[in-house]
Amino acid sequence: MTTAQEYRDKRWIALFLLCMTQFMVVLDASIVNVALPSIGEALDFSQENLSWVVNGYVLTFGGFLLLGGRLADLLGRRRIFMIGLGIVGVASLAAGFASNEPQLIAARAAQGLGAAIISPAALSIVSTIFSDGAERNKALGAWGAVAGAGGAAGVLLGGILTDGLGWEWVLWVNVPVSAVVLALTPRFIPESRSESQTRTFDTAGAVTITAALSILVYAIVDAESAGWGSAQTIGLLALSAALHGAFVLIERNSKAPLVPFSIFRKRTLTGANAVGLLVGASLFSMFFFITLYMQQVLGYSPIEAGLAYLPLSVAIIISAGVGSQLVTKIGFKP
C-alpha cells in the first residue's frame, strides 16, 4: 500500500495524469467540429441536427458539472475520478461505432456526463495534493494552460485524424488515454474527500438546470424549421424559463445548494464568470460554423480545415502558458 509520503513524492506525476485527463475533456468539446461534415455524410445527419453532436456533449457536461464536484467531495475524489474515466472510455468507444443520429448523440451525451464527473474531481485533487502558495499556483497554472490548449488543439487534431483514419477516430482517441490514466491512478493519486457534515447531493438542482439548458438550446436550434413565433418554440422557451425559475427555488431552499447565490455578491467572481461565458460561447460557436464554411463552401479537406486553425491554436497555447505565469507574478486584475 502506498503511504501518504510516497503519494506526495509522486505528486508531479499525478499532476501530469490529471492534466492529460483535463486536456482530453476540453479536447472532446472541439475535436468533433472538423469531422462534422464527414459525420453528417456517413450517418445521414440533417443539417439542423448536426449541431447536437457538439451540444449533446457540452450540455450534459455543463449541466452535471456541479453535481460531479459534489459526488467527488462526498464519495471520494479518486473513486469518482476513476468512474468518470470509465464512462468516458466506454461512451467514446460506443460513439465511434454509432450507426445513426440517436446512437451518436446519446453516446456524446454520455461522454459529457463522464467529463462532468472527471473535471471537478481532478481539480479538487490538484488543490488537495499541492500545498497552498507558489507550489499550488504553479500546478494550477499548468492546469489552466492545458485546458486552454485542449480546445485549440482539438480542431487541428480532429482534421488530422478525420483525413488520415476516419471520423470515428476523433472519438476513439479517448479510449487509450482513459485506459492508461485509469490503470495508473491508484499508484499515483491518493484518495481524499470533504469532511463536511452536510451530505446531500442536490440531484434535483442538477437535473433541473440540465433540463432547462437542454430545452433552451433545442428551442433555439429547431426555431429555424419550426418558426420563431410557433407554438413549439414559444412553449419550449416558456418551459425552459419555468425550469430555470424552479432551479432558483430549489437552490434557495437547499441545505447545501450546488450554487449558493451569495457567491455572486463577489464582483470579481461574477465578472470572471461573465467573461468566461462570453469567451466560451464565441469560441465554440466559431469552431462549429467556420468548420462547416471551410469544408462546405471553400471546399477544404478535413486536414486543410484543421491546419487553417493552426495560427489560432498556437496563439492560444502560447498565451495560456504566458498568461498563467503573469497571473502569479503581477496578479489577475492587470
Image (tube, rainbow, N blue to C red):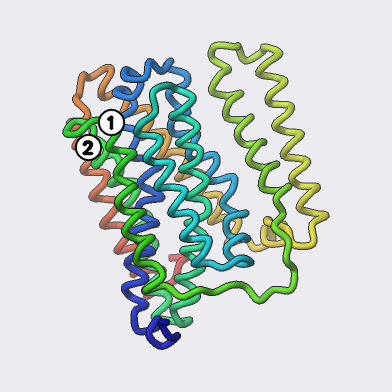
Point out residue 216 in the picture as x, y percentages from the top left corner: 62, 30
What type is the residue that disc 1 sits on?
Trp
Q: In which quarter of the image is the C terminus?
A: bottom left
Q: How crowded is mark 2: few (under 14 residues within 10 Å), some or many (20 or more)?
A: many
What type is the residue that disc 2 sits on?
Leu
Residue drawn 22% across the image and 29% down it: 302
Say which of 78 and 130 sits in front.
Answer: 78
Residue 260 appears in the figure: no
Sequence-wise, which precedes: disc 2 or disc 1?
2
Could you say whether the residue bearing mark 2 is in a helix, strand or loop? helix
Residue annotated with mark 1: 167
- Mark on residue 117? none
- Mark on residue 161? 2
Say which of 163 and 329 sits in front.
Answer: 163
Say which of 278 and 231 sits in front.
Answer: 231
Whether residue 12 is situated above or below residue 45 in the rendered picture: below
